[in-house]
């Protein structure tokens, strides 16, 4: 936390250098490799580590300018390895905006997305966010997966403020304005749905990014439902904005951890959410879906 306005201004002035320092520290540990996927594990999704052939584990505390998350179940490690032979970097936990919302001058949001910029500096091609989300759609049930089709957001846009001179990983010229109509890749989402459908229901839906730290009120549920949202979470959207601004493709999913009724009532609390995420059947479904997705990606798309 910054104690003075001058410290916040210094963070802004040094932001690009902070990203480069983080990427250099990671590269020093994993070598000059270009991960195909960068995966962020949301709440309760640590079991996905079991699907990775781990080559290197780096605590966030060993990476300059990375921040260790305060939410339990967000372990705070960067893991490099392979899934089905495909190089991946996995962010084991994220900083949510609500943790740093009191940082001045949008520096809190810049901290939230700094790891995504670092992934881009490593040359990561595809960003794969995961999160826990509350069901808004009346047909969504606890434990089901939702492949994210698009999002709306109450969170500050991470591109607000001064522009940066970061390069895109796809070689295209950076754009001052970033299009999000195609933020989530249609082909990759279809593959994710196909992979997950072997193990249970996988929806394709819209994610509403809320600020937290509250779960949705009745009015917010009804408003979100009228607006077309299928699920609500407290992350993902800012990360995706940065990933797209850096030229990465995006595919991701939410785990539905609670349901809302027709009146918009949502009885969830954090203990209930954690209970769903710890359910063995849900954990097996998620891990199997990810493994199958990577198997299909390797078979159909991946070229070493």
Image: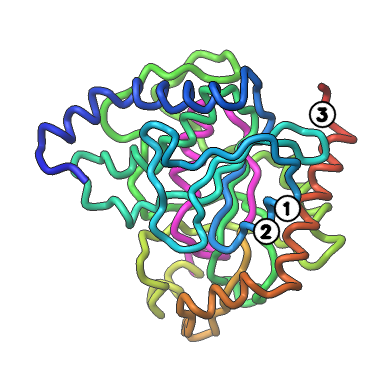
Q: Which residues are magenta?
A: 226-253
Q: Which numbered disc flags the more N-terminal residue, 3 or 1?
A: 1
Residue 230 is labelled as none
> Farthest right residue?
299
Q: Which residue is mark 1?
A: 50
Residue 47 numbered mark, or none: 2
Q: CA distance from mark 3 to mark 1?
A: 21 Å
Residue 302, numbered circle = 3
Residue depicted at 77% across the width and 33% down the height? 86
Expressed as whole percent of the image width and height from the top left, the position of residue 164 reads: 35, 21
Which residue is painted at 40% across and 48% down in the image? 68
In which quadrant of the rendered image does the C terminus lie?
top right
Name the spot of residue 291 as percent of width and height, x first.
Answer: 80, 49
CB of mark 2 within 8 Å of CB of mark 1?
yes
Q: Quadrant of residue 15?
A: top left
When the figure is inspected, residue 77 is found, relative to residue 47, above or below; the finding is above
């Amino acid at each position: 936390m910054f104690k003075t306005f001058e410290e916040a201004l210094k963070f802004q002035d040094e932001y690009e250098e902070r990203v480069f320092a983080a990427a250099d520290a990671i590269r020093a540990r994993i070598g000059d490799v270009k991960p195909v996927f960068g995966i962020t594990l949301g709440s309760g999704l640590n079991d996905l580590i079991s699907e990775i052939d781990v080559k290197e584990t780096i605590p966030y505390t060993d990476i300059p300018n990375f921040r260790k998350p305060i939410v339990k179940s967000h372990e705070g490690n960067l893991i490099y390895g392979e899934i089905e032979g495909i190089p991946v970097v996995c962010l084991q936990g994220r900083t949510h905006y609500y943790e740093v919302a009191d940082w001045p001058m949008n520096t809190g949001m810049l901290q939230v997305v700094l790891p995504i910029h670092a992934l881009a500096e490593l040359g990561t091609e595809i960003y794969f966010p995961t999160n826990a989300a509350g069901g808004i759609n009346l047909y969504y049930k606890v434990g089901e997966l939702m492949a994210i089709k698009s999002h709306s957001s109450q969170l500050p846009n991470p591109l607000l403020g001064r522009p940066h001179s970061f390069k895109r990983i796809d070689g295209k010229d950076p754009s001052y304005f970033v299009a999000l109509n195609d933020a989530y890749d249609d082909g990759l989402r279809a593959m994710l749905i196909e992979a997950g459908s072997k193990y249970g229901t996988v929806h394709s839906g819209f994610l509403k990014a809320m600020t937290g730290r509250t779960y949705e009120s009745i009015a917010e549920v009804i408003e979100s439902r009228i607006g077309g949202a299928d699920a609500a979470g407290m992350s993902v959207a800012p990360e995706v904005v940065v990933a797209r601004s850096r030229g990465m493709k995006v595919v991701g999913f939410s785990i539905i951890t609670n349901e809302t009724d027709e009146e918009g009532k949502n009885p969830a609390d954090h203990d209930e959410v954690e209970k769903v995420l710890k359910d063995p059947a849900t954990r097996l479904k998620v891990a199997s879906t990810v493994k199958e997705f990577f198997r299909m990606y390797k078979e159909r798309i991946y070229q070493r």
